[in-house]
Image (cartoon, coloured by chain):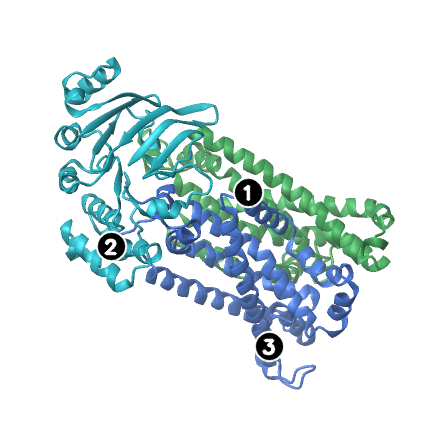
């Protein structure tokens, strides 16, 4: 194995191939983190709505979740990038096609965010539903309104319970960020393939990319375990309270 | 103070409450008993609208529970409730469990709420545990905290839904003692329980339910002396000769 | 907007799209069977008391699960021709064709995910069942195949199927190596005819109908299971 190519001047951009790798990592992280912010906030709202006793709040959230999780991410990526600018009103489409800065990047962020929101929503919903009904009753019996019961009783517990599956969801969006290469975002996987095409050092550059993905996954996994430990409720052993 | 008139409730086609009527006067302690599945827990939960009902009327101090415009949070904040499984909020410290509704519902300042909570914890003998989480307490201690949580709202009445049936036997008395003291002080109470000892010592009236019906609604003396309904007699002999 | 939506394009593309769909479904089905088989072996290795089995299996599963599927596809498209040349000893050996390359990549990738499901399923079988099997005099292989795995799989079928629906969605990613699965077919027509709106929306609709229907049946199956267990 020979890694000296990393230090050779790159085909374009003025730097060396190592700069391409670093740039790839940067875009992978940017797409994942911004997408996650959308997914987490939208998914939380949708997940709460899915547990609402009011059907006209529940129904749209259910429709959203079913649509976004039953269409492959790649198809959604193409729809955001190629189809949306054509079917929105003309002035918006023109803006999307000609004036929008970094269209590949922002489309990838929105696509990953909206897609992952449907998965986050399901985690939030199941977290809330895993809390015994008696907790809601107790909160209501004290005179809290339903929104207050969510805010002070249900959500604080639900978010603690779903830390492990939410970690998985974050790692999923992080890995799925590579799908952004199909619309031209030069994230880590795209850079790895590009470098392999210019240098023929396929084995080496794939190893590097694999190690970087694995290291970030490990870091996230361990940080979340630490968070889970920090957020642990003393004396609480998961599942139902009481008996 | 609490009045129920012909309350009926269905789950689908199954009728869980059949024409239940009763009234609880101020300062009265009423025990509701009956075999499991008789609807007694459902009945008590209709009083603060945790269980909706389809027919009949319930009023608490003249305010209709089932009417569409009723401010339920306000109504519920005036009635304390204690649950079978305690239902303390596991992620909050004991004292914060008692503070929560005082601050969020009654808009008390946090100092005021805290002082009230500590006084109530002292009263149930748990002020030393204020900073712990519920999961670190025994069942009996958790239930005493739950009673303190209900009392913190200065309720006009307290509802108890099988407060001792999830407890180990040695912890039952510590909870019943707190409830007995509360009754002596004149608190209006509706208690669903199988503890007939408590009923005979503390209750003014006993309601016996079976299959969603109020079969017997009598003064304590009459109920334990000679219940009129045969089903109540059978139930009593089963419970007492155990 | 939709005023110039051209259904003709879709109708004339149907035979080609149908071929693509057969590719997608075939790849899904075979990768699912291969993945579950390999995943079961990996799970048994991970649960083995022998470190020489459990460590490599654990390392493989954790590594595969931490990298993107697209990178895995690139890896196998790079490695398979090299492996073929080495195994056959012929430096000019032709590859094994795009379908089988994709099949190997997906099987190896999905096996890691199936492994974790199957491992959880095996662990959910009460220890008492294992003890009872051994107490009857069964050996490891008998206890595993006759007592443990049948119970584990029964509990796991819904989640294995759900994972397979996601696998079906993931097969669209063979697009990155230019294969003509359903999405690849839609994409090729879309570009040839300049009809991206029609074909991508049609592809989305078809994927949605298939995945939604499949999820619905899995949900019903799960409900039946839950009733059976209570």
Query: On what subunit does the disc labeled 1 rest?
Result: A
Contact flag, marks 1 and 2 (Cβ < 8 Å) = no
Q: Chain C is drawn in which colour?
A: green
The kind of secondary structure element at disc 1 is helix
Which residue matches tag 1?
A55
- Residue B94 — which label? 2
Same chain assignment for discs 2 and 3:
no
Query: On what subunit does the disc labeled 3 rest?
Result: A
In space, the residues marked 2 and 3 are separated at their CA atoms by 50 Å
Q: Chain B is drawn in which colour?
A: cyan
Chain identifier matching the blue colour in the rendered picture: A
Image location (x, y in percent) of residue A132: 37, 43
The residue carrying pointer 1 sits among few (fewer than 14), some (14 to 19) or many (20 or more) residues within 10 Å by Cα, namely few
Which residue matches tag 3?
A23
Image location (x, y in percent) of residue A206: 59, 68
Task: From the image, state whether disc 3 or disc 1 is nearer to you.
Answer: 1
The kind of secondary structure element at disc 2 is helix
């Amino acid at each position: 194995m020979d890694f000296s190519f990393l230090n050779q001047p790159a085909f374009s951009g003025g730097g060396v191939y190592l700069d391409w790798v670093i740039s790839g990592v940067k875009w992978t992280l940017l797409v994942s983190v911004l997408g996650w912010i959308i997914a987490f906030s939208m998914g939380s709202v949708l997940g709460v709505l899915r547990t609402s006793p009011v059907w006209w709040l529940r129904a749209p959230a259910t429709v959203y979740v079913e649509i976004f999780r039953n269409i492959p991410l790649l198809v959604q990526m193409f729809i955001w990038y190629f189809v949306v600018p054509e079917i929105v009103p003309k002035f918006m489409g023109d803006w999307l096609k000609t004036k929008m800065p970094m269209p590949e990047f922002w489309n990838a962020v929105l696509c990953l965010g909206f897609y992952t929101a449907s998965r986050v929503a399901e985690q939030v919903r199941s977290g809330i539903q895993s809390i015994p009904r008696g907790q809601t009753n107790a909160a209501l019996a004290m005179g809290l309104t339903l929104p207050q019961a969510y805010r002070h009783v249900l959500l604080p517990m639900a978010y603690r319970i779903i830390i492990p599956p939410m970690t998985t969801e974050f790692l999923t969006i992080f890995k799925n960020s590579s799908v952004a290469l199909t619309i031209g975002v030069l994230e880590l996987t795209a850079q790895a393939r590009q470098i392999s095409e210019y240098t023929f050092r396929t084995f080496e550059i794939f190893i590097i990319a694999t190690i970087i993905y694995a290291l970030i996954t490990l870091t996230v996994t361990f940080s979340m375990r630490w968070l889970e430990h920090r957020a642990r409720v003393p004396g609480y052993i998961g599942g139902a309270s009481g008996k | 103070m609490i009045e129920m008139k012909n309350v009926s409730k269905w789950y689908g086609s199954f009728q869980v409450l059949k024409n239940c009527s009763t009234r609880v006067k101020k300062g009265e302690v009423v025990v509701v008993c009956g075999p499991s599945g008789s609807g007694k827990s459902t009945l008590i939960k209709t009083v603060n609208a945790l269980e909706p009902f389809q027919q009949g009327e319930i009023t608490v101090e003249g305010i209709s529970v089932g009417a569409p415009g009723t401010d339920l949070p306000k109504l519920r904040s005036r009635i304390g409730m204690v649950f079978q499984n305690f239902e303390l909020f596991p992620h909050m410290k004991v004292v914060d469990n008692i503070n929560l509704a005082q601050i969020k519902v009654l808009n008390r300042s946090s100092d005021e709420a805290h002082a009230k909570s500590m006084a109530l914890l002292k009263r149930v003998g748990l002020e030393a545990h204020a900073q712990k989480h519920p999961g670190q307490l025994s069942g009996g201690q958790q239930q005493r905290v739950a009673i303190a949580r209900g009392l913190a709202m200065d309720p006009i009445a307290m509802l108890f839904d099988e407060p001792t049936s999830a407890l180990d036997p040695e912890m039952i008395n510590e909870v019943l003692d707190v409830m007995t003291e509360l009754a002596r002080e004149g608190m209006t109470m509706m208690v669903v329980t199988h503890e007939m000892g408590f009923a005979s010592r503390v209750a003014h009236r006993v309601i016996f339910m079976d299959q969603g019906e109020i079969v017997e609604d009598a003064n304590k003396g009459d109920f334990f002396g000679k219940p009129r309904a045969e089903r109540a007699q059978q139930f009593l002999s089963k419970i007492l000769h155990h | 907007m939709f005023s110039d939506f051209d259904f003709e394009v879709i109708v004339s593309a149907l035979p080609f799209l149908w071929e693509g769909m057969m590719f997608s479904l075939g790849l899904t089905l075979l990768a699912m069977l291969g993945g579950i088989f390999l995943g079961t072996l990996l799970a048994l290795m991970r649960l083995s008391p022998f470190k020489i089995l459990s460590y490599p299996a654990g390392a493989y599963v954790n590594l595969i699960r931490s990298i993107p599927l697209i990178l895995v596809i690139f890896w196998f498209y790079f490695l398979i021709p090299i492996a073929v040349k080495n195994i056959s000893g012929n430096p000019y050996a032709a590859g094994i064709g795009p379908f089988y390359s994709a099949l190997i990549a997906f099987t190896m990738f999905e096996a890691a995910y199936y492994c974790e499901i199957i491992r959880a399923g095996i662990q959910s079988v009460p220890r008492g069942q294992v003890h009872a099997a051994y107490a009857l005099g069964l050996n490891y292989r008998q206890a595993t195949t006759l007592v443990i795995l049948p119970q584990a799989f029964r509990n796991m079928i819904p989640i294995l199927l759900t994972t397979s629906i996601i696998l079906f969605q993931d097969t669209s990613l063979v697009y990155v190596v230019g294969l003509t699965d359903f999405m690849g077919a839609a994409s090729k027509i879309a570009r040839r005819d300049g009809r991206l709106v029609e074909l991508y929306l049609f592809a989305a609709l078809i994927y949605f109908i298939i995945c939604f229907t499949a999820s619905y049946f899995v949900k019903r199956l799960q409900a039946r299971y839950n009733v059976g267990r209570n």
